[in-house]
Image (cartoon, helix red, strand yellow):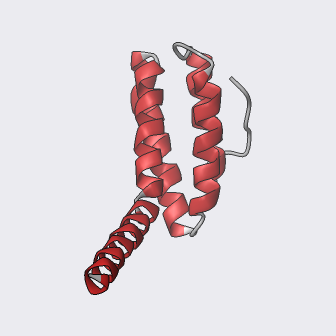
Amino acid sequence: MRWTAYCVLGFALMVALASMFLLNSYQCPLVHIVVKNTALQKAPRDDKPRIEAAFERARRAADQQNRINAYLEALFAISQRMEKVQGLSHQGSEEIIRALDAFSGQRQEVGTF
């Protein structure tokens, strides 16, 4: 009976470790997709291509410069600011684009919504 309990416990531990590893390795792509899609849903129609391109530039810069944690912090900051608004104005879209471009090294100015 003890042997079975140890096997079940060992299997549960392996599943938990594998799940943690998978979630950790997909954390940045998941947060990126959620924040990008939220911004695209709230943005004016004519700003959507520019916002999507800014998110992709920032993600590539984070990957190339090995700045994943900094990119996650930038995404969380954008997400927190977007929580407070129902829809983005053109100015709000510009602020997101500037924040992402500042992260990717395109521009250095960052504002608030």
Which residue is at the far bottom?
Answer: 3
Q: Is residue 30 visible?
A: yes
Q: Nearer the viewer, residue 26 or 111?
A: 26
Q: Which residue in the rendered view is the most extreme toward the front?
A: 1
Say if 73 sits above or below 49 in the image.
below
Identified at 39% across, 74% down, the residue is 13
Give the percent coordinates (x, y) of residue 62: 54, 60
Q: Is residue 76 above or below residue 13?
A: above
Question: Which part of the image, by quadrant, shows the C terminus?
Answer: top right
Residue 89 image-quadrant placement:
top right
Q: Quadrant of the N terminus?
A: bottom left
- Do we see residue 104 in this rendering? no
Q: Position of residue 15 (x, y in %)?
A: 33, 70
Query: Residue at point 39% right, 31% down?
Result: 49
Q: Is residue 103 above or below residue 110?
A: below
Residue pictured at 58% horizontal, 43% vertical = 75
* Count of all numbered marks drawn on residues in the image: 0
Residue 17 falls in which quadrant of the image? bottom left
Front-most of residues 105 and 69: 69
Tell me residue 22's x, y (percent): 37, 65
The percent position of residue 107, horizontal first and vertical second, equals 67, 45
Q: Quadrant of residue 96?
A: top right
